[in-house]
């Protein structure tokens, strides 16, 4: 993968984009106008993350890959703020990487002009064509990504980096004295971890049961890079999911467990709205060996009996605590079956990489 850069993370879920230095570069106009062009401001950006811990080899990828940014897919869009409107002004030239610092060139503000910066990462080397003065909401709705099939997490040297979005918290004038502060990048994918006797990121296993496969149904094959339908973000968790109107549904996505205990950092999907019943909500079918035979168990993602949406930048943890009876003999029977099976499991959701809790509840197993 060309110029793919990895950064380490600990418990923090965010990528911080921090303005490091700023200098003015004055440029002369073309000879035919003999006028001075709008000066430019060169800003050096430093992408920093806390140190990562060590991860077991059973994981397909690590936090390094979850936070990696392809510099060729790192874009900065600039929007002019006029009252309550934010209109597209321009996309900055290709960001440069020198001595571990990103350098981006911005136009200096004139008079009382104020601008907001929007950062898009890993959503393509070239963004859709955007006309000047297009409202920000319309611009962000143009930027989508494909989530068809299993997200590629083959390993640290073979994976697809996650689309990310972030923007400056306030609109500011762009000058040599400007301090933009930090821009938090949120991943556009949700992560689902499944484990037996799972505590944090270590699975101890469940007596008498060996986890073999996890299949996930009704996932979306397309997503937005930015949370266009979420007006509020609290502790890096969006208030509402954002799903393109033309998103379709993937066929079943199946993952194989190699250690009989867990699938961690392997399942990543685009956001999804909550369903109204077991036939239109995202669900899992878990396959495993119990009493010497392979059985399948359906897992509905619910909190306190209610179906939940699947939100970007959140980690959903399915912790299997015990298996006390045989399941269905085929995956299809488990998907559509109505028999309650004796499997004890918990579901928890948290902001990806932090300890912010989005909700807890008992999984409904049908």
Image (cartoon, grey):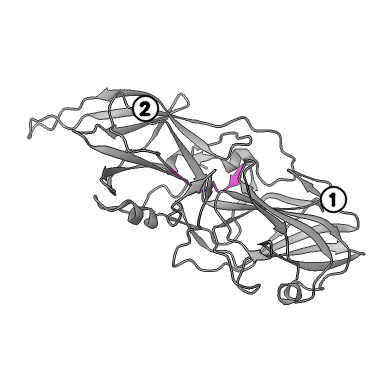
- Residue 98, how many percent across, how many down? 43, 26
Q: Which residues are magenta?
A: 157-166
The foreground one among 359 and 293 is 359
Picture layout, residue 212 above or below residue 355: below
- Residue 164, how many percent across, how many down? 48, 46
Picture layout, residue 79 above or below residue 141: above
The foreground one among 32 and 210 is 210
Q: Residue at x 74, y 41 (%)?
A: 57
Q: Are marks 2 and 1 in contact (CB under 8 Å)?
A: no
The foreground one among 130 and 113 is 113
For this orientation, the residue located farthest to the front is 304
Indicate the secondary structure of the residue bearing disc 1: loop
Q: Residue 59 magenta-drawn?
A: no
Name the side, left or right, on which 183 lies relative to 26: right
- Residue 297, how many percent across, how many down? 78, 67
Spatial CA span between label 2 and label 1:
50 Å
Q: Quadrant of residue 251?
A: bottom right
Q: Residue at x 73, y 75 (%)?
A: 332
Name the side, left or right, on which 253 lies relative to 272: right
Picture layout, residue 96 above or below residue 89: above
The residue carrying pointer 2 sits among few (fewer than 14), some (14 to 19) or many (20 or more) residues within 10 Å by Cα, namely some
Name the side, left or right, on which 78 lies relative to 8: left
Q: Residue at x 19, y 33 (%)?
A: 110
Q: Give the mark nearer the N terminus: 2 vs 1.
A: 2
Which residue is under mark 2?
A: 179
In the drawing, what numbered circle is on residue 205? 1
Indicate the secondary structure of the residue bearing disc 2: loop
In the drawing, what numbered circle is on residue 264? none
Q: Quarter of the image for the C terminus: give it.
A: bottom right
Camera-near label (2 vs 1) is: 2
């Amino acid at each position: 993968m060309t110029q793919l850069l990895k950064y380490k993370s600990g418990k923090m879920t965010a990528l911080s984009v921090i303005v490091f230095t700023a200098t003015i570069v004055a440029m002369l106009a073309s000879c035919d106008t003999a006028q001075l062009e709008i000066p430019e401001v060169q800003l050096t950006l430093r992408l920093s993350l806390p140190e990562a811990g060590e991860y077991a080899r059973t994981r397909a990828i690590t936090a390094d890959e979850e936070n990696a940014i392809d510099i060729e897919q790192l874009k900065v869009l600039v929007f002019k703020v006029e009252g309550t409107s934010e209109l597209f002004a321009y996309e900055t030239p290709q960001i440069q990487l020198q001595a571990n610092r990103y350098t981006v060139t911005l136009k200096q503000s004139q008079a009382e002009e104020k601008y907001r910066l929007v950062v898009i990462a890993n959503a393509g080397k070239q963004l859709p064509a955007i006309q000047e003065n297009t409202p920000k909401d319309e611009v962000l709705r143009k930027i989508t990504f494909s989530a068809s099939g299993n997200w590629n997490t083959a390993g640290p040297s073979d994976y697809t980096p996650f689309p990310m979005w972030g923007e400056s918290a306030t609109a500011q004038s762009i000058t040599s004295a400007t301090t933009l502060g930090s821009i938090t990048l949120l991943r556009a994918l949700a992560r689902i971890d499944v484990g037996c006797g799972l505590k944090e990121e270590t699975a101890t296993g469940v007596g008498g049961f060996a986890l073999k496969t996890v299949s996930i149904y009704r996932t979306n094959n397309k997503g937005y890079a930015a949370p266009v339908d979420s007006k509020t973000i609290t502790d890096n968790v969006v208030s509402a999911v954002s799903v393109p109107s033309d998103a379709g549904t993937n066929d079943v996505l199946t993952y194989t467990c190699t250690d009989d205990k867990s699938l961690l950092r392997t399942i990543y999907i685009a956001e999804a709205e909550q369903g109204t019943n077991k036939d239109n909500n995202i669900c899992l079918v878990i396959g495993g060996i119990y009493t010497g035979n392979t059985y399948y168990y359906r897992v509905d993602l619910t909190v306190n009996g209610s179906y939940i949406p699947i939100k970007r930048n959140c980690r959903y943890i399915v912790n299997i605590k015990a298996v006390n009876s045989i399941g269905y003999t085929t995956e299809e029977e488990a998907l559509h079956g109505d028999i309650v099976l004796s499997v004890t499991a918990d579901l928890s959701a948290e902001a990806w990489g932090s300890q912010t809790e989005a909700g807890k509840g008992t999984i409904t197993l049908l």
